[in-house]
């Protein structure tokens, strides 16, 4: 109990273990149940450490060879073992292990076998090198890199169930404040769930090495109020805005290879290799969270994606300045 | 005296045809040697060389990670660095240096003149040495140095399908596969040799229950290595078949399984880390008693715990796969198996503590490193227990917490005990003592650097920093901790340089050691320092676990207490 309090007290020190992606700032059920277990395990380990390390320090001080010792030149009494002592330090660890194991098994089952409420939101997450595809099958929404979900009121839970798949190599979905990570493995379907209780932006990133730009495959989860989420869904289902000022840019987009990789709903662009761009201008970031979304950054990214993310799979488009300006203006109209 | 004359007559002509001293002749003697001592030293020498190389790779990574969005190293180079660092350290530093010490010490400690299969011994060494050269040739081969070569960049676990041709074009993955295959063949050869030697070449009177614990631990380690390398070899062959002959074992685009690679790799990978740590226990079992001036506490329990660790370690592998989406039942089984291993491991720590208790501890450098090992292995084991709790691992796995944990074991436990073993057995190998003054500098520099780096490395993991990233965002709050971690790396480098200097300086200027500088009790201390090529002119006969203790303390035979 003392070590639990001590550990918790130490963890309250601000800015040491609290950060936007700290596992010790849980929000939502899965993260909280992991946090509870982790405090138990941590307390027990700290207690064991203090005991054994304390004994070790005592021993190396107390039994140091001292030349002033009257028996300095004699060997100490040779002790070869003790059945009682050895039995006790076998049995006690076994008991600790059993207790830890049972506590752990409980959290495993409660997380993995949690009954799914009827009003849970389903999102299919498809991992790509090096971006995230999000599909809401029952809502007809397809988007990329910025995941919007409704907050979940603990009294009337509306969790989000994520079905995890991969289009290429292994990835892992990790938003530390919301849940432990689960891998996205090609040719295999995994599931996990999150239920943030507080609105806001939750950060994370890919947690399984997937190639050159693994480090910049960032995650942004927006927990919206139910009203905000409903409005977002309605907006996302609309096809791309048609703006007369961006006609030239749209022509550049549609006459270059852009349409082979990207989708802009309601146009001839139906590519699926890269992120859906139908509402790209509404996103806070581009390049999977790595770059702030602005006209200047968008232009620079289209000109040479490797400038921001060396090793990214989008090639430089080799557009001249005029076409770059036009296509950037077009992309900025895709609200 | 009738038996002496033929021996002397046989020795004189042998001395007359003693090998010459030209450089070419010395080189020839080393290259063609089948003497376990020379082979052991070649293993150790090549491992030290690659320790420096892989350490340099680590320094480069730590410079890159010291600040967010750094541009010191490109992402592609960084990915090659962590792959080469891990692959080199495990296969071309860890395995060779541990087999090197084993090869040197085991015949001497069991009263034998060499290993059971001397030519297999040499073959194993050269396999691993050429494997390491092949791995490093990858920097030059293919695109050549200007394009940073084609060194493997898929991580030392080489997860599928990242290693498939579409995601890893060129030959970088193949360099990894073939170099590690060679290392595997070498390990199997060494393992067979150690098991055969230990079982069948002990001197008269040395029953298994009188065998030094170092030899017991190497026996368990070798049996484990023997079993565990085969799954990796099989997986690598399947990978080559996928890459070149159109099979689809791990080719997920064609229905193959990425998880299958993970199972094969970790069935190897987890016991592999026990293969690496058991020799550290072996050294501790010899060094701690001598500098406490007491017999090891609980010899039978130590044997049982070591064998237990060997067996249980074969059943825990999927704790590296807790995030892969296994069923709750499977996750629970691996939690149980992993937590179970902490029981025999804890027993060993307690027995070492009890050995120290009531002793007269002498803080020579070898013992200081051993005490560091005890504290650090305790911490490493406890962070391992945290990772064993699967839901906790769902957060901590794949993060810098895990990197901190395993470096705590590999550096804090294994490397510390290796340093200890160097200080302890260098006099036997070379005939001179390592400088204690330089040793203390080495110890303090290294322990401070170690803790600066690896204590604080746990925190970015808790703050959500995944591993294997070449850079990170500034707004995560990770920078301060990364700077501290990186600074420790430089302190450890200075400590290591002091050590290397000590090794070289002491060879020429160290105090002459004599056969038994530590007043120790096992058979290797009964030979000259260095031992003659044949180890023992007359094969010894032993009557207890500590034959030299019996000679030095005839009034208090160890045999009475068996």
Image (cartoon, rainbow, N blue to C red):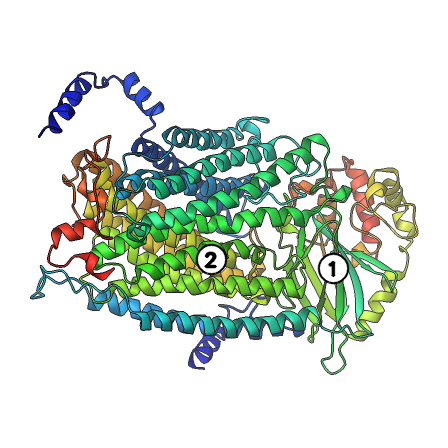
Question: Under tag 1, what secondary structure?
Answer: strand
Residue B439 % position (x, y): 24, 48
Is residue B459 positioned above or below B159 on the image? Answer: below
Work out whether residue B408 or residue B43 is closer to the camera in this orientation and state it.
B43
Most distant residue in the front direction: B2
Q: Quadrant of the N terminus of chain B?
A: top left
Q: Disc 1 designates what residue?
A: A146
- Give the mark toward the camera: 1 or 2: 2
Instruction: Give a yes or no on whether discs 1 and 2 share a subunit.
Output: no
Q: Quadrant of the C terminus of chain B?
A: bottom left
Q: Residues within 10 Å of mark 1 (few under 14, many from 20)?
A: many
Q: Give the CA separation, mark 1 to mark 2.
A: 33 Å
Residue B78 % position (x, y): 54, 42
Residue A291 % position (x, y): 67, 52
Q: In the figure, is residue B418 to the left or right of B20?
A: right
Work out whether residue A264 or residue B518 is closer to the camera in this orientation and state it.
B518
Chain under label 2? B
Residue B148 % position (x, y): 55, 32
Instruction: Report if residue B485 is visible in the image.
Output: no
Q: In the figure, is residue A321 to the left or right of B499?
A: right
Q: In the figure, is residue A260 to the left or right of B456?
A: right
Is residue A15 positioned above or below B234 on the image? Answer: below
Instruction: Report if residue B397 is visible in the image.
Output: yes
Question: Under tag 2, what secondary structure?
Answer: helix
Chain under label 1? A
Q: In the figure, is residue B364 to the left or right of B227?
A: left
Residue at figure coordinates x 44%, y 53% from the top left = B407
Tell me how many marks there are.
Answer: 2
Task: State the image quarter where residue A193 is shown.
Answer: bottom right
Is residue A216 positioned above or below A324 on the image? Answer: below
Q: Disc 2 designates what residue?
A: B405
């Amino acid at each position: 109990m003392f070590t639990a309090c001590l550990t918790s007290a130490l963890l309250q020190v601000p800015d040491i273990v609290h950060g936007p992606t700290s596992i010790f700032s849980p929000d939502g059920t899965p993260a909280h149940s992991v946090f509870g277990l982790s405090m138990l395990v941590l307390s027990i380990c700290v207690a064991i450490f203090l005991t054994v390390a304390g004994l070790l320090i005592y021993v190396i001080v107390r039994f140091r060879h001292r030349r002033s010792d009257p028996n300095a030149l004699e060997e100490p009494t040779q002790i070869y073992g003790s059945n009682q002592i050895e039995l006790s330090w076998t049995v006690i660890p076994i008991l600790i292990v059993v207790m830890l194991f049972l506590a752990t098994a409980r959290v495993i089952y409660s997380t993995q076998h949690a009954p799914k409420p009827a009003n849970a939101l389903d999102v299919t997450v498809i991992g790509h090198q090096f971006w995230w595809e999000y599909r809401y099958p029952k809502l007809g929404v397809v988007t990329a890199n910025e995941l919007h979900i409704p907050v979940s009121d603990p009294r009337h839970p509306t969790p989000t169930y994520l079905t995890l798949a991969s289009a290429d190599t292994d990835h892992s979905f990790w938003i530390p404040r919301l849940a432990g990570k689960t891998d996205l493995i090609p040719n295999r379907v995994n599931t996990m769930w999150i239920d943030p209780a507080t609105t806001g932006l939750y950060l994370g990133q890919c947690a399984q090495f997937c190639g050159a730009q693994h480090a910049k495959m960032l995650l942004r989860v927006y927990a919206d109020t139910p009203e905000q989420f409903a409005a977002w869904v309605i907006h996302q289902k609309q096809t791309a805005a048609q703006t007369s000022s961006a006609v030239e840019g749209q022509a550049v987009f549609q006459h270059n290879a852009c349409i082979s990789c990207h989708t802009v709903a309601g146009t001839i662009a139906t590519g699926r290799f890269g992120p859906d761009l139908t509402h790209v201008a509404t996103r806070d970031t581009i390049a999977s969270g790595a770059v702030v979304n602005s006209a200047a950054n968008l232009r620079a990214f289209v000109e040479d994606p490797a400038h921001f993310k060396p090793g990214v799979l989008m090639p430089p488009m080799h557009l001249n300045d005029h076409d770059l300006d036009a296509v950037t203006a077009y992309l900025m109209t895709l609200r | 005296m009738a038996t002496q004359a033929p021996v002397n007559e046989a020795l004189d002509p042998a001395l007359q045809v003693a090998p010459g001293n030209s450089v070419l002749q010395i080189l020839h003697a080393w290259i063609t040697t089948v003497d376990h001592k020379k082979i052991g030293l070649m293993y150790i020498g090549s491992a030290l060389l690659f320790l420096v190389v892989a350490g340099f790779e680590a320094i480069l990574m730590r410079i890159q990670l010291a600040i967010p969005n750094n541009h010191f190293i490109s992402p592609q180079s960084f990915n090659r660095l962590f792959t080469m660092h891990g692959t080199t350290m495990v296969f071309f530093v860890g395995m060779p240096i541990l087999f090197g010490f084993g090869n040197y010490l085991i015949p001497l400690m069991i009263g034998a003149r060499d290993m059971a299969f001397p030519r297999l011994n040499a073959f194993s060494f050269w396999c691993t040495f050429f494997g390491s050269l092949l791995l490093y040739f990858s920097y030059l081969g293919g695109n050549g140095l200007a394009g940073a070569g084609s060194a493997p960049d898929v991580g030392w676990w080489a997860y599928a399908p990242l290693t498939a041709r579409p995601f890893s074009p060129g030959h970088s993955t193949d360099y990894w596969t073939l170099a590690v295959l060679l290392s595997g063949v070498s390990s199997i050869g060494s393992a067979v040799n150690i098991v055969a030697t230990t079982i069948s070449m002990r001197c008269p009177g040395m029953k298994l229950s009188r065998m030094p614990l170092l030899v017991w631990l190497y026996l368990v380690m070798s049996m484990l290595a023997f079993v565990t390398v085969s799954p990796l070899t099989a997986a690598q062959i399947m990978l080559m078949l996928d890459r070149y002959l159109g099979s689809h074992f791990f080719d997920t685009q064609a229905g193959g399984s990425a998880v299958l690679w993970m199972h094969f790799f970790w069935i190897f990978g987890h016991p592999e880390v026990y293969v690496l740590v058991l020799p550290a226990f072996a050294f501790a079992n010899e060094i701690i008693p001598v500098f406490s001036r007491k017999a090891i506490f609980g010899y039978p329990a130590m044997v049982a715990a070591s064998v237990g660790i060997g067996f249980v370690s074969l059943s825990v592998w999927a704790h590296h796969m807790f995030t892969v989406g296994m069923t709750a039942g499977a996750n629970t089984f691996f939690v149980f198996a992993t937590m179970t291993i902490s029981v025999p491991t804890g027993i060993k720590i307690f027995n070492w503590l009890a050995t120290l208790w009531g002793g007269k501890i002498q803080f020579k450098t070898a013992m200081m490193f051993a005490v560091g090992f005890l504290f650090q292995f305790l911490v490493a084991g406890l962070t391992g227990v945290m990772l064993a709790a699967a839901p906790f691992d769902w957060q901590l796995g794949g993060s810098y917490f895990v990197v901190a944990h395993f470096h705590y074991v590999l550096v804090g436990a294994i490397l510390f005990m290796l340093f200890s073993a160097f200080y302890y057995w260098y006099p036997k190998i070379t005939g001179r003592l390592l400088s204690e003054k330089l040793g203390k500098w080495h110890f303090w520099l290294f322990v401070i650097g170690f803790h600066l780096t690896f204590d604080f490395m746990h925190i970015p993991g808790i703050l959500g920093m995944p591993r294997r990233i070449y850079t990170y965002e500034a707004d995560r709050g990770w920078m301060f901790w990364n700077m501290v971690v990186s600074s420790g790396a430089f302190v450890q480098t200075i400590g290591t340089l002091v050590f290397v200097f000590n090794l070289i300086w002491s060879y020429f200027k160290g105090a002459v050691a004599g056969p038994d500088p530590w007043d120790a009790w096992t058979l290797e201390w009964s030979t000259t320092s260095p031992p003659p090529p044949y180890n023992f002119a007359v094969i010894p006969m032993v009557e207890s676990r500590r034959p030299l203790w019996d000679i030095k303390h005839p009034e208090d035979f160890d045999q009475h207490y068996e």
